[in-house]
Amino acid sequence: MADFSRPGSLYGAVDLGARKQALEAQTRREAAGPQAASSASIVDVTEETFTTDVIDRSMTVPVVLDLWSPRAPGSAQLSPVLEKVVGSLGGRIVLAKVNVDASPQIAQALRVQAVPTVLAIFQGQAVTGFQQVLPEQEVRRWLDELMGAVEQFYQANPDARPPAAGEGPAPEAPPVDPDLAAAEQAIDQGDLDAAEAAYERLLARAPADEDAKMGLAGVRLIKRTADADPADVQRRLADPADLDAHLLAADLEMLSGSVDEAFARVVAVVKRTSGDDRDKARRHLLGLFETLPADDPSLAKARRALASALF
């Protein structure tokens, strides 16, 4: 698994215009239409084109910055490898090449201490990088791990995923759906299994139905905590390795209305775990996200925290 914290010599070096600027740039680009967004996957970047070619484009596709110099032997070795590997990915990643001799302000803003330096930019932020000449196999592995982390980000932030070419808006669910009514009736009667089945039937037909997503997530949350002993859960929390206890504690916090505390607890688990445990915690948090409406302010904060933990 890649270490998606920033390299020590680059940590905190630059916010690349900040998230707000990047989102505004995305809006400008979308307004210009799809033709304005399409271009080659390998571009030469200058100080004048940095915002457009790096910040703007990073909102929909990872941008790999190759900070090179004609005076650096390592650049002559690494740059062709980056061009070959990125060129084979069919536009899934953009390679932005910066000659630090010709564009010293970019190098200064990024606090580049040596060349070659490679940074990956996504959603307007530097998320990972390295400062050495790597063989082709290692570069491919690094990019694979980057794309895996990007996919996890989109799973946590589905609204941020750019639409596929020719993809239209998701169909709306009918204004009144019999399965939604059946689910609500089952909840009134205390039959959680019947409510869960009704929500699942509705979502099989209308995957974008927010009411059904919230309802199903809420029913499953109640079912998970039905037999929980809060005192026992509190005792088990003394063991940081007891993953199930920490996830169950988050469920109980959600039910009590401590939404931010629940989200923070699971994000902390994601940060300190790896492998299957980390993925289990991530998926659990995504399930908790679905218990709230999409515009709930706690979601935006938690999604940012999860993205930070993943990268």
Image (spheres, grey):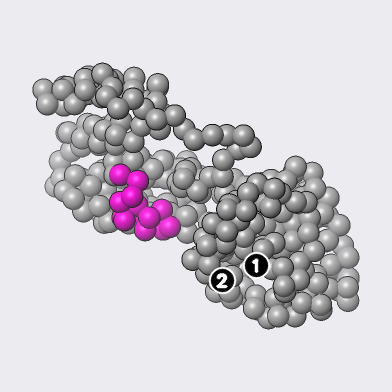
Question: Is residue 292 a member of the stretch shown in magenta?
Answer: no
Using a 10 Å C-alpha cutoff, classify the residue at mark 2 as few (fewer than 14 neighbours), some (14 to 19) or many (20 or more): few
- Relative placement, left or right, of 310 versus 193 is right
- Relative placement, left or right, of 146 versus 301 is right
- Relative placement, left or right, of 100 versus 169 is right
Q: What is the spatial separation of the Cα atoms under label 1 and label 2, in whole angstroms? A: 8 Å
Q: Quadrant of residue 212?
A: top left
Query: Looking at numbered disc 2 in the image, what kind of residue is underneath it?
Result: Gly
**For this rendering, which residue is in front, 62 or 20?**
20
Q: Which residue is mark 2?
A: 17
Q: Secondary structure at mark 2?
A: loop
Question: Is residue 298 a member of the stretch shown in magenta?
Answer: yes
Q: Looking at the magenta stretch, what is its main secondary structure? A: helix
Q: Position of residue 118 (x, y in %)?
A: 71, 64
Q: Residue at x 63, y 49 (%)?
A: 33
Q: Quadrant of residue 16?
A: bottom right
Q: Secondary structure at mark 1?
A: helix
Toward the front, the furthest residue is 32
Q: Position of residue 158 (x, y in %)?
A: 47, 43
Contact flag, marks 1 and 2 (Cβ < 8 Å):
yes
State which region is magenta.
293-305
Disc ID at residue 233? none
Q: Position of residue 27 (x, y in %)?
A: 54, 57
Q: Residue at x 38, y 55 (%)?
A: 300
Whether residue 142 is visible, yes or no, is no
